[in-house]
Amino acid sequence: MKRLLFLFAALSLLLAACGIGSNISETSNGEVSEETTEPSANEAEVETQEQVEEKETEVAEEQATASGQEEINLNDYRPATDKIRTYVQDEFQITYEVVDQNDQYVQESVKFGDVSSQHVYQWGKEGFSIVYSEENPQNESSIIEDFKPAESPKEAVSIKSQGTGESDKWDMTVLEEELSVPYDTFRDDVIMMKKTVTSETSGQKTSTIRYYARDVGLVKEVIEVDGENGYTITTELEEITETNE
């Protein structure tokens, strides 16, 4: 019996020297059992936290790569002053002219047949909105130095507060394919904005899609109304002329 105990002791020392991660013990009936060393709770928690952080980093990198878009500066998409832009809508023509602009505002005159209006946009690099509107104005000269902005702006567009295109907030994306309108074909620097408004009474949805080109402004607009009596209105840029021509 002493010899047997000596052999077991020698075997235990040999396994320990070889670095095997298990414990050998003798049971009451003389049998040998092996106990596997398990990682502690703290070690498992640290490992799990590291895995979570690595996964979050990978997801963030994938999202950044998927977007693949440079930061948009909406000031680059302002229309130029002293240019008349003519749009075609079916058999009708609409003209837009920027009367004046400064670092904060853009004043634009719109004529559709015998009807005229003017709008003032508060326009910055992160968004723009209509802060003043007037139908058939008597004074069509610059008013951006002394007009009174509306308390509730209209048609607000913001890079920081975007929707999904299926809500009443504008969703903004960089157009990857080329865009052709009667005036020209735009291959770069076009942004697309979309929003959808749902009627609270009828449930009818109206989707508006607008395309803006750098240094030109609006080049195309598509309005789609769904339902049994739905329709589509498309307005496209046809011509740009200098005001002194």
Image: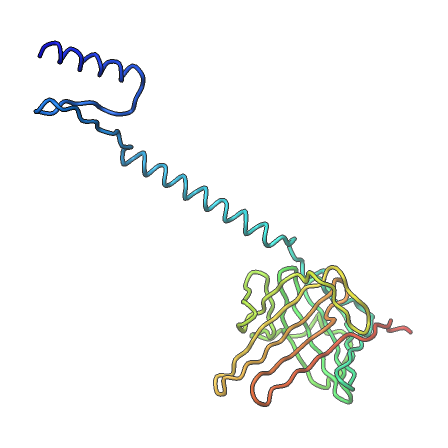
Q: Quadrant of residue 91?
A: bottom right
Would residue 70 appear left or right of 44 to someone viewing this image?
A: right
Q: In which quarter of the image is residue 194?
A: bottom right
Q: Quadrant of the C terminus?
A: bottom right
Choose between 131 and 229: the one closer to the eye.
229
Q: Locate residue 29, reporting x and y percent.
A: 8, 24
Choose between 101 and 199: the one closer to the eye.
199
Q: Quadrant of the N terminus?
A: top left
Q: Locate residue 153, reporting x and y percent.
A: 59, 73
The answer, for residue 239, to whether it is visible in the render is yes
Would residue 228 appear left or right of 125 to someone viewing this image?
A: left
Say which residue appears at 63% left-offset and 52% top-offset. 68
Choose between 209 and 228: the one closer to the eye.
228
Would residue 7 appear left or right of 190 to someone viewing this image?
A: left
**What kind of colouring is applied to the model shown?**
rainbow
Q: Locate residue 122, reporting x and y percent.
A: 65, 68
Say which residue appears at 70% left-offset and 79% top-offset. 234
Q: Quadrant of residue 131?
A: bottom right
